[in-house]
Image (cartoon, helix red, strand yellow):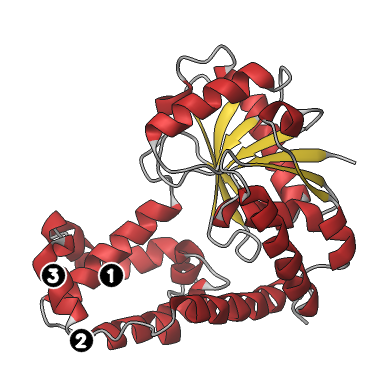
Amino acid sequence: MESVAIVGTGLVGRAWAMVFARAGWAVRLWDPVPGASDHALALCRTGLEDLAARGLCGDAPAARARISVHTTLEEALEGVALVQESGPERLEVKVALFRDLDRIAAPGIPLASSTSALRCSLWSEELPGRARCLVGHPVNPPHLVPLVELSGAPWTDPAVVARCHAIYAAIGQSPITLRREVDGFVLNRLQAALLAEAFRLVSEGTVSPADLDLTLTRGLGLRWAFMGPFETIELNAPGGIPDYVSRFRGFLELIPRDPARPEVFGDDAVARIMAEWTPAPETEAKMRWRDRRLAALRVHLDTPPE
């Protein structure tokens, strides 16, 4: 049985634990905060039962039994095939933590970070084993959303990236590989571009926040759940992508000529949005609702078409 060390057992770390455990891996939890791993283990038990109830985990008790808590980093890293770091999103923390991981983990074992925005080169450059370091960025929550972005530094061994790609695919995730480093990776750059235009349209009074969200959930989002933007436009013109661009180039060029400015995320713009936005009364309840809907969508999308 392959084993993985989950270093950092917060929201993302415990989700990774469920992903690996339901795929048959032994999962070794470690967190520098006393009691954090035990708390994560209890939440994994409940989470795996919820996944099983929705057809996303075959045997929840068996998966739970494959997760163990370890009190030292040395103990957690013993004999693992992969280290998945999911610590705080602070550069100084990553640098110190990866210094320890590189010192303790057996040579050649990939060291992957779940970081959402910190490029691999920022925290791995001074490490003796920097060639085995990479970003393995999941989408929250990873046990329901399968995408994983793989991004190495210029010195990361391509064989390590390929090995991790195979691991993530084998455990049921959907890995993609970035050909070069870029701030925010791919998903967050796309999300930021959409958010900037959404903030502009609402803060300038073009549309309400609720109607903006409806544009996605009842419009673009329905197609995007199973088709990306290239596949979408290929089907929106008889001649495919070149035909689509030829037909709509005039409009498509308007937006890049006048992009949303950084000011769209300023205090005034946020205040205008919040004046019309009704926050969820209970964030935790809304997150549980989101996870139930994601689970149902995941089952639907994983079902082969007739």
Q: Earlier in the sequence, mark 3 or mark 2?
A: 3
Q: CA distance from mark 1 to mark 3?
A: 30 Å
In this rendering, the answer to whether 99 lies above or below 62 is above
x and y, in percent, of residue 247 in the image: 30, 70
In this rendering, the answer to whether 105 lies above or below 57 is above
Residue under label 1: 248
Q: Earlier in the sequence, mark 1 or mark 2?
A: 1
Residue under label 3: 269
Q: Amino acid at mark 3?
A: Ala
Residue under label 2: 276
- Residue 176 in sight in this render: yes
x and y, in percent, of residue 50 in the image: 73, 75
**SS category of the residue bearing label 3:** helix
Q: Residue at x 61, y 50 (%)?
A: 36
Q: Amino acid at mark 1?
A: Phe
Q: Residue at x 35, y 40 (%)?
A: 183
In the image, taking residue 149 as reference, residue 60 lies left or right, namely: right
In the image, taking residue 78 as reference, residue 147 lies left or right, namely: left
x and y, in percent, of residue 152 in the image: 52, 31
Q: Earlier in the sequence, mark 1 or mark 3?
A: 1
Q: Residue at x 51, y 75 (%)?
A: 287
Badge 2 crowding class, 10 Å Cα cut-off, few under 14, some 14 to 19, many 20 or more, is: few
x and y, in percent, of residue 281 in the image: 39, 85
